[in-house]
Image (tube, rainbow, N blue to C red):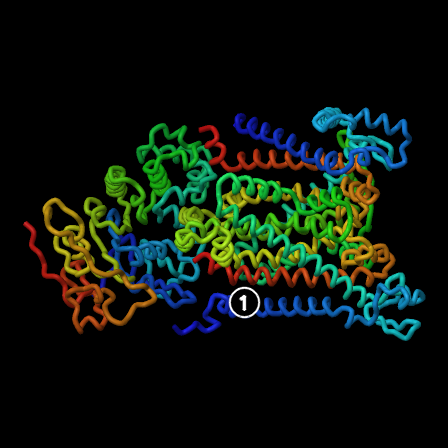
Amino acid sequence: MKTMKFKDRPLGKALTEYVESPMAVAAFCVVVVFFLAAIFASQIAPQNPYDLATLELLDGTLEPMSEGFGGMTYLLGTDEQGRDMLSAILYGLRISLSVGVISTLLAFALGTSLGLIAAYKGGRFETILMRIVDLQLSFPALLIALVLLVILGQGVDKIVLALVIVNWAYFARSARGNAMAERNKEYIEAAKALRLSDVRIIFRHLLPNVLPSIIVIATTTVARAISTEATLSFLGIGLPITEPSLGLLISNGFRYLLSGKYWISFYPGIALVIVIVSLNMMGDRLRDVLNPRLKR
Amino acid sequence: MTVFIIRRLLQSIALILVMSVLVFLGVYAIGNPADTLIAPDATEEERTAVIQHFGLDKPLYAQYGKFLSNALKGDMGDSFKFNEPALKLITERIPATLELAFAALFLTILIGIPLGLVAGFRPKAFFSKLIMGVSAFGFSVPVFWLGLMMVMVFAVILGWLPASGRGKTVGFFGIPVSFLTWDGIRHMILPAINLSFFKLSLIIRLTRAGTQEVIRSDYVKYAKAKGLRSSRIVLIHVLKNTLIPITTVLGMEFGRTIAFATVTETIFAWPGMGKLIIDSISTLDRPVIVAYLMMIVLMFIMINLIVDIIYSLLDPRVRLEERA
Amino acid sequence: MKEETMEHGETLGVRGLKTYFFTKAGTIKAVDDVSFSLRPGEILGLVGESGSGKSVTGFSILGLVDEPGKIVEGEILFRGEDLRSASEERRRSLRGSSIAAVFQDPLMTLNPVLKIETQMIEAVLAHSAISRQEARRKAVAALTKVGIPAAEERLSAYPHQFSGGMRQRVCIAIALLNEPKLIIADEPTTALDVTIQAQILHEMRSLCVQSETSLIWITHDLSVVAGLVDKICVMYAGKIVERGSVDEILNSPRHPYTYGLIRSVPSRTARGKELYQIPGMMPSPLALKEGCAFKARCARADSMCETQPEEFSLGEDRTCRCFHPHPEERQE
């Protein structure tokens, strides 16, 4: 049997359609660039902003494109401690992105599994799980995060945990919803008739059919996780000062805003917004591309 | 109709009780209630007094009982920082937050619905695409960044509006409100817009989608066949049907708005509940945190109840089914 | 095609109407050269299966064809006035007053969140500058006329509080409110059960005859039109394939499609015989080929049918768009 050409297989079709929108492609490129910048931050950054020895205190709050005492040109200015903003942003990006991605991966694993199991097993488990999901989703994410941080305390792991707890519900609801449509189909019946184990059925048969819409949710969840963490850090109850994410940088620079030294908040803010908006655009495009397929 | 209200009321009360148990467990069981309710610098006498007052030496269910009875009396401990009853601190600040939230709601309805209608009726027009683009942006961008940008542009660069604080207040049925003074309004403009931005984007999208759906419906076609003027078709037929789901969303979003007010209040130094809770979390002023949580839960559930009632008033199908 | 001269006093004259839908997948010729006319009090049955273009014809006359559809050619004369060149405001003022419409499913066409009262009064007030009380009185009168008991109280009800038959009567009442000269009814009884159907048909007929109102009854169900209409136009794939008086068509169908339709209706006289079915399905409007659209399903087709047949005249006001029509059947 001749194998299908890549562009005719579902994945190929989806990708081919995805790239039809120039905006979506641009968004994707931006996201890739930012992720690479974050990964290679220590190589790219002109300065290590957390090595106090490299900082020139006299270079504090310099405007962008100004030259410092040590002869270094600060492309995006410096903060009050003489830190190069560009470097700070690169390192901050690393933290913001990793917290966002890791928490989303965990939420994805947890939420999708629970959602699939609920749809497959049905019964009381499903009802109870969905009640919890509905209840949780009726409260704003920020509030839940606030509450969790109060109870759990501060720290990177606590933030990740809080984000996972906030976001798993979206995955669970979507996974269960889609699996519900699939669970009565014949291929599942066939798998059951073959006495395949439940785990195998759920993960080898149900999951791939549910994956497209989950991927859309994952993309927007990463954006939302990054946004939520930034908000929490900005408010001062997020990541501790030892792990300065973009949110913390922005918060730090807030007080200088009113006296006109905008760059300390502005540029980290721009970086944050670009990443979030690009991720959301990708998610939107993916949804358009993947959903009509589901409707079939 | 009354049966409907009573049933929903009972459901709400049940939910409040459930949430109170959750909050209680979170604070008393997971955390150390002694730490939660007794200031770190309290004397031995004060410690004993609090332990007795809250029954911390008794078994868990008795503690819950005490918790509940105290809460109903309005006693949720004293703030560590201010040495005043936590609940009082919160309730003092509720008017400020609610005022901001209502202002944001008002703006959302005033701007969002007309824009959504326009975008729905003429989706291909440039103006509509512009509206959708900006709203997509507003949807994704974090609220606090928008606030910062607004402060930067309008307060620092242009100097038109004040960057922080609440304006002059005036008594209104005994509650201090600031929208009745021009100074108050000036101070409210930026934070209200900031707070409304997210909801605005949502409402524009929803109104647009709803409008597009309703336009294609048979009853609009029939209204045209009856020879009705377009203005009437839009204002009466389209709007009423589109408004129903939008009202529900607005109601639910109102709760979210109150939660998000924490960010806006922090940026604009608006003296509401939100600012208080952030400060309290940073200083670990736990009685205030507990009081805040209970208040928020209460407000949420009440808002849901009111939204349900409004929805049944708007959609006659729901109302009459209940009676049958 | 015999040229139909416009008679003095003709209510509606449609000539060469072409309504096309320009979609991404291609151009759909929903109505492709349709002509007919109506005198005051005359009832026309426009018959065809779904996709034949009958509903679009009705919408075209009303001026309610939405994007991506467009009337590309043709004349629509209402009492001598050219509707196509009339302003949108003029058309709006005619709709609901002189030209009224009744659609298929009143649960969908009546706005579910507005009272019947509101929906009736607005129909009156859109066309006359009378007071609300006056309009209300008219509404009550119209409801009573269509046989709705306790009309005064029923006005304050919502659409879903009526039964199916009653709802449709409300729609008919709305159509009659402003004394129209022409009513276009698109499958109005399809959603109702048979006994109600019969009642409404009978009532519509007497109302139209009484007030000399012309009526176009659009349906896919031939048995429905038998007792109601004066003449029939049968549509297939956007064209009229046969026209004639109701007796002529029902007793002696000439076009193979009409023939198949009539023979496929169960009847007492043909008891025991096998029910005739037209093989195949109407071609997709995007896949129409050259020649007669029916030839793929027609037992009488041959190489002649590769060219598009015109409407050949078989008598006065009697045509058939076919090279090989069935012979005429004499009925006693």
All told, the count of numbered labels is: 1
Q: Residue at x 14, y 63 (%)?
A: C325
Residue B84 position within the rendered picture, expressed as x and y whole percent measured from the top left = 85, 31
Task: Indicate whether B57 appears above or below C146.
Answer: above
Task: Bin the neighbour count of mark 1 within 10 Å (Cα to Cα): few under 14, some 14-19, many 20 and up.
Answer: many
Residue C133 position within the rendered picture, expressed as x and y whole percent measured from the top left = 45, 32
Is B264 positioned to the left or the right of A107 in the image? right
Q: Which residue is mark 1?
A: A18
Q: Amino acid at mark 1?
A: Tyr
Viewport quadrant of the C terminus of chain B: top left
Q: Helix, strand, or loop for circle 1?
A: helix
Residue C256 position within the rendered picture, expressed as x and y whole percent measured from the top left = 17, 61
Is C87 positioned to the left or the right of A43 in the image? left
Toward the bottom, the furthest residue is: A71
Is B16 positioned to the left or the right of A52 in the image? left
Q: Residue at x 86, y 67 (%)?
A: A63
Residue C86 position within the rendered picture, expressed as x and y whole percent measured from the top left = 41, 58
Q: Residue at x 72, y 29 (%)?
A: B60
Q: Residue at x 9, y 59 (%)?
A: C328
Give the quadrant of residue B32: top right
Give the quadrant of residue C121: top left
Task: Indicate whether B298 appears above or below A240.
Answer: above
Asked if residue B22 can be seen in this view, the reply is yes
Asked if residue C210 can be seen in this view, the reply is no
Q: Badge 1 sits on which subunit?
A: A
Q: Pick the residue in front: A178 or B98.
A: A178
Toward the left, the furthest residue is: C332
